[in-house]
Amino acid sequence: MSEQYDVALIGAGPGGYVAAIRAAQLGLKVCVIEKDKPGGVCLNWGCIPSKSLIHQAEVFHSLSEMEEAGLKVDRSTLDYAKVQAKSREATRQLSTGVGGLLRKNKVDLIKAGASLAAKGRISLDNGKEVTARNLIIATGSQAMVVPGFEFDEEQVLSSYGVLAMTRLPKSIVILGAGAIGCEFAYVLNAFGVQVTLVEMAEHILPSEDQEVVEVLEQAFAKSGVDLLTGVRATGLKKTKSAVTVAVEDGSGKKTDLRAEKVLAVFGRTPNTRGIGLDKVGVKVDERGYIPIGDYCETNVKGIFAIGDITSTPALAHVASKEGEIAVEFIAGHNPAVRSVDPDLVPSAIYSEPQVAGFGLREQQAAAKGLKIKKSVFPYRGAGKSIAVGKPEGLVKVITDPASGELLGAHIVGHNATELIHELLLSKRSELLPEDIAEMIHAHPTLSEALMEALRGVDGKPIHM
């Protein structure tokens, strides 16, 4: 007879392992089932290794600053295989660490493939079965495959293939200028690869505030990245030595782009097929996502879904929070919130300059006919940005002109992904712009740009 758990989770990514640990802390008997390494795609083939590559790209790119100080550097000795190996070591350490955290919290980690057999029952691919009073599905997502642009991971790469790459190509076409596309455009360009970045929308990072995105577009153009926006890829042909991508703009003009490799990052699709959802009656929408209600519960009582398999923002930190909400509900606690509020979810793009934001975008306000008040403060107005040689960027806050409520905030610039949280905390705590504007900020810091932007809401910035 199989062991009975209070909660069984399928998937040990940032949603699954966080939920499992929190459930154990709440006194529940928990297991998490994972067919691969703990940490999921994010830790093993996404967020963590990509950030290691980004850091090393920043260090390599910063050598030009040392050359200005008289240091001579021979960049031709770069061994990208060692760069990639360092990124893999980061994932190994952290995946091992997640396993240790699960053991420390007495969570049973079951290494197997899994599918739902019936309500409260999970079949494992080793022939065994797990039973639990509550099930949480956290199977994540995978790279979207578009017909005609299938991955071979040699010439046509997914995000997995580009992270596994140990040799830099001379040139690459990146299809899709979302977060992943922009981050790899920065990394590869910094290491000397000729990058062409293609985006169907009129701007890169189409879900971010347009005024902020324009700063990154200028930085990319300055660094030599070829930007093609308002253009869609229509076909792809491969030879032994190159790949040719056919693209077409809005006027019907067609162009062929030739490069050594192509990185296709059209988006991601939820891992909801083949896991037995139909056997237990869990509904799935036409795109393959699982609709959820309060506390991330599906239409079947006692079965929950978190992370990329739902239609909430496909971000690791969203999956983690949803996992916490679900298990706190299961444990009989009263979670502070019933679901994740999209307006309180920070976005973070780790290019240089970085982009971060939350809440209302100006173009969204315009599309909805909303009246807003905005304040924009340039990075170069904060002395620290000049001192560290990172003056490109801005802080933008959007407020309600009547109540003064902070509706959104957006930053582009050095360390933007770290700075955004002061503004997010202000929004979550229902503070008004003057509450932060009047707070003493250490000098010199980049956070002074936040203070000045909030002063600007009342037209009183000092350094502008």
Image (cartoon, rainbow, N blue to C red):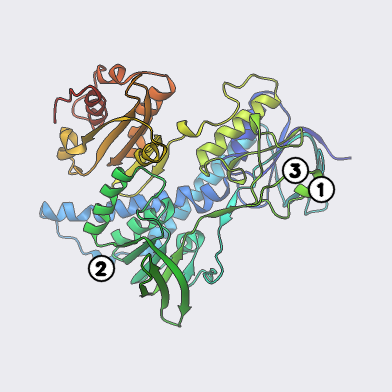
Left or right of 282, for residue 433: left
How far apart are labels 1 and 3 at the CA level?
8 Å
Amino acid under label 2?
Ser
* Residue 223 seen from this side: yes
Asked if 409 appears above or below 333 in the picture, the reply is below
Q: Of label 2 and label 1, which has the lower sequence position?
A: 2
Query: Residue at image x 41%, y 77%?
Result: 244
Quadrant location of the C terminus?
A: top left
> What residue is disc 1 on?
279
**How far across and down, in percent of the image, does residue 236 sit?**
47, 75
**122 or 274: which is nearer to us?**
274
> What residue is disc 2 on?
76
How far apart are labels 3 and 2 at the CA level?
55 Å
- Looking at the rendering, which quadrant does residue 211 occupy? top left
Left or right of 127, for residue 27: left
**179 or 399: which is nearer to us?**
399
Quadrant location of the N terminus?
A: top right
Mark 3 lies on a secondary structure that is: loop
> What residue is disc 3 on?
282
Query: Residue at image x 24%, y 42%?
Result: 393
Mark 2 lies on a secondary structure that is: helix
- Looking at the rendering, which quadrant does residue 250 occupy? bottom left
**How far across and down, in percent of the image, does residue 412 sit?**
29, 42
**220 or 11: which is nearer to us?**
220
